[in-house]
Structure formats: C-alpha cells, structure tokens
Image: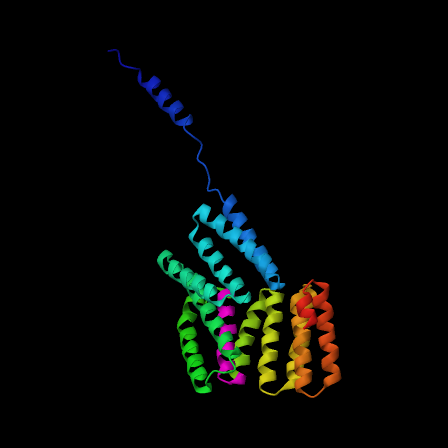
Amino acid sequence: MKKLPIYFAFIFLLFSCSSSPTPVPDIFTTRDMAVQQLNLASQTANRGLYEDALLMVEEARRLSLSADDPALRIQSTINRGNILFSLGREALAFNDWEIAAAEADTSGESVLAAQARIFLIRASLVLLSNDETADRAASSAAAAEFKTELDRLLPAVRQDPHSSALLYLTLGLAERQLERWTEAETAVRRALDIYERNLNLEDAAYSWFLIASIRSLSGNYDAALEALRASIRLDRRVENSYGLDSSWQAMGDVYQKAGRSEEAMAAWHRAAEIYGAIGLAERAER
C-alpha cells in the first residue's frame, strides 16, 4: 500500500483537530436562577410574607436539585427551615436544618454545616425564651450549653461575614437567656459592626432591635427606646415596612413597661397603620 506523504499526514492531523467540537464553558443558567429565587425569598420573608417566601424557596430548591449543585441544595434547605420556623412549623424547620447540616458535612461545605447548626441553636433559644413555664435553672443550663456549641462553631465561620454575624447574634440570644446583659449586647454589637461594614442595613436594623430587647429586659427602658429609634432609622432607609412596624410595636411595649401609656398607645397606633398598609390586617388589629 502506498504511504501518505508526511506533509499530507500533517495537514490531515491539523484539519482533524480544527474540526473537533469547540470547548463549552461551564453553564450557570439554572444555578443563577436558583440564587435569584433564594434572594427574592429572603427579601420577601424579611417583609413578613412567609407563605409567599415559602413558594419562592421551594422553587429555588427545585432548581438547585435539577442542577445538582450541593451548596445551593444545602442553602435552599437552610432557608426553607428559616421560613418554616417563622410560620410556626418548628418540627419541619428543625428537620430541614438537620438535613442541611448532614449534607453539608458529607459535601465538605463546612461553613454551611456550621450555619445550619447555628440556626438550630438560634431557634432553640427563641423557643426557650418564649416558654414561660420553663424551669429557670434548666433554661440557663441549656443556654450555657448552646453558648459552648457556638464557641466550637466559631472557627468554621470566622472568615465568612454573613455566617459569623449570624453566630454573634445567636450568641447574644444565649447571653440574654443567661441574663448577662453586657455580654449579650457586646455580642450583638459585633454582628452589627459586620452588617454596617457590608451595608446590610436590614440586618443592622434587626441588630438594633435585638439590642433594644436586651436593654428592655434589663430594665434600661430609655436606652431600649434609643436602640429602637436607631432600628427605625435604618429600616426607613431601605423601606423595610415589616421591620418598621415591628420596631414601633416594640416601642409601644417599652413605653408601656416604663409607665408611659399615652406614648405606648401612639406607638402601637403607628405600628397598626403600617401593618394595615402592607396588608397584614390581623397584626394591625392585634
């Protein structure tokens, strides 16, 4: 058989290479849609529209599953737990956070694993704080255990601003449960500093709201009102109506504690007006 000339073989090789498929870059269309849905769900939840937010986070989770993106799967599960907890479906919320933590461990997502566990602790502290029948000594012991767990989780989130701020807020709740008022406010202020540096004004407003609750529980009503005014100023800047009405309602509660009934009624009326304006009629009536 006659051999091909060497130059012909080279040309054949060259054209064979040039006709191969063009390399395709990574495609992020579905993942970008999932991120957008997660952000929209968070914004909607921050305004108290939890049922709408749940639909959005379910869609984000569907997109995350279709793209088989571990981080987005985990984040959507965490966010769904947050919304379910806000809707009063505590058992389902705890289940979501536990699933997210386990999947994050398996996937090597250490920050998300810590974040899921922080939400578990935070929710437990909220339930503990709201349980008026709980034994005080048992509640304090539980809060101390949660504080120890948060200290253990700190190294995993130290380099992530969002997660570290979340941890400090939760640490503030633990210290508040222990009635360590100075330590509680110090912890929340560390979160506040992170939010202010990153211009997360809604989260900064919530930090001031939490500081107000700490000051109110300690009997420092004037300082609590000052913190609520700071929260209102920030929420006005981002038109966060749900945050505004929550702060005005809390302001009425603090005024009432301080024996300033007329100012309490005025603050509650302001809260009711805002609740009514954003379509939360039941809250407005209450």
170 left or right, relative to 6: right
Residue 51: percent from left, percent from top = 58, 59
277 left or right, relative to 59: right
Answer above or below: position of 5 versus 172: above
Between 200 and 266, the one nearer to me in the picture: 266
**Quarter of image, res 232:** bottom right
Q: Residue furthest left?
A: 1
Report if residue 227 is visible in the image.
yes
Residue 189: percent from left, percent from top = 56, 76
Report if residue 234 is visible in the image.
no
Between 260 and 239, the one nearer to me in the picture: 260
Between 5 and 226, the one nearer to me in the picture: 226
Q: Quadrant of the C terminus?
A: bottom right
Q: Main secondary structure of the magenta part?
A: helix
Q: Which residues are magenta?
A: 162-182
Between 145 and 273, the one nearer to me in the picture: 273
Report how many numbered discs are placed on residues in the image.
0
Residue 171 part of the magenta-drawn span: yes
Residue 281: percent from left, percent from top = 69, 66
In percent of the image, x 65 and y 72: which residue is there?
246
In percent of the image, x 43 and y 48: which residue is there?
68
Residue 127 part of the magenta-drawn span: no
Q: Residue furthest top?
A: 2
In percent of the image, x 46 and y 40: which residue is there?
25
Answer above or below: position of 181 versus 160: below
Answer above or below: position of 167 versus 57: below
99 left or right, relative to 192: left
